[in-house]
Image: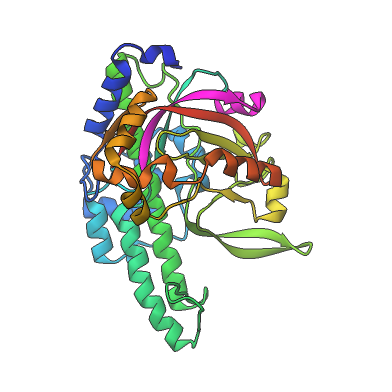
Amino acid sequence: YLTEADLGGDMKENLAEEMFQKIPVGVGRKGEIKCTEDDLDRLLTEGVDWAVEKGLAWPEDRDHCEENGRMEMADPTCVSKRAKKRGLKQLGTLGAGNHYAEIQIVDEVYDQNAADTMGIGKVGQVCIMIHTGSRGLGHQVATDALTTMERAMSKDKIQLNDRQLSCARIGSREGKEYLSGMASAANFAWVNRSCITTLTRKVFADMFKRTPEEMEMHLVYDVCHNIAKVEEHSIGGVMKKLLVHRKGSTRAFPPNHPNIPKDYQSIGQPVLIGGTMGTCSYVLVGTDKGMTETFGSTCHGAGRALSRNQSRKKLDHEQVLARLKNDGISIRVASPMLVAEEAPESYKNVTDVIDTCEDAGISRKVVKLRPVAVIKG
């Protein structure tokens, strides 16, 4: 594995620049990875299985993805032509907003056994965290569903107390089609992150003149954000099948749960919590208490303290960039004006959020990661 010492001299800056050049970032940026319409339909159905077949993921990566990187209820016929058109050119792209790729350093280890099991147990070790999703395809799936569900609400006489919300009955045609479209978008997101992982491995291999295998660039875990999943949970001592919505939360299953990888059975599911730009991130594990208290869920990040509009008015993007540079963090951004929206002051303190979840018993800290290079849209 690599250590912080390997990033000395110009290496850190050169890595940041090379990642920025090789991983398309920013609003609407197109990817370099070729994808035909037939490929798209297959990857929407097959998820990471397709990526492995195409050499865009290691076979072992699949084992370290939530759902093994494939939602079985996916159906590309439930994804509109417009959504597919948006996704076709965006495979292997980061996008904008709070999405990023970061080079990070293991800063503190709280659970040595769990950290060693994940392969990130050495202080000073280099890690890469990638945070992105289903890009324009997933956004369009949601936009399309809002229109469909508003009609379904009218038909089924469903009234909600917030005009920004809409829904459909799970067993209705609209409900089933949305879940299949959403699952297809989740499969796209797994493949997208797999492609970015492959591009990152290639950058490091080219820069260090070593293979990704020699540098132990193994996938720790790929966890979903913002998704609804059919799961079994105990309600009043009775196991029931539920549709669990995790919006602004992350799945955090405990040790010995059948739905987590074999090599993590003894420690629980890894949970990746990204901090804000220039602040620390964390890797956690799920707990038994979380399973009973929060349907096996924990936080998904720090959460905003200021709206995007407030951030732009209150913060100067040049000052934010200068402060990151002073902190020794290399940064590459496609849209510098958007930096203020993602500044640390725009978010709650991630450590406070993590400690609150640990105090509540719904997740446990394993390692703290410190950023040294940030690539953003």
- The residue sitting at 62% across, 35% down in the picture is 365
Residue placed most toward the observer, 214 or 167: 167
**Residue 55 visible in the snapshot:** no
Image-based side of 97 in relation to 335, left or right: right
Residue placed most toward the observer, 197 or 17: 17
How far across and how far down the image is residue 76, in percent?
Answer: 34, 61
Please tell me whether residue 113 belongs to the stretch shown in magenta. Answer: yes
Magenta span: 98-120
**Residue 226 visible in the snapshot:** yes
Q: Quadrant of residue 244?
A: bottom right
- The residue sitting at 31% across, 34% down in the picture is 321
Residue 319 position (above or below residue 122): below
Residue 84 position (above or below residue 132): below
- The residue sitting at 63% across, 40% down in the picture is 355
How far across and how far down the image is residue 22, in percent?
Answer: 23, 32
As drawn, the residue found furthest toward the right would be 237
- The residue sitting at 60% across, 23% down in the picture is 116
Across the whole image, how many numbered discs are drawn on residues?
Answer: 0
Please tell me whether residue 14 belongs to the stretch shown in magenta. Answer: no
Image-based side of 259 in relation to 373, left or right: right
How far across and how far down the image is residue 189, in percent?
Answer: 38, 49
Task: State the colouring used for the structure image.
Answer: rainbow
How far across and how far down the image is residue 85, in percent?
Answer: 22, 58
Q: Quadrant of the C terminus?
A: top left
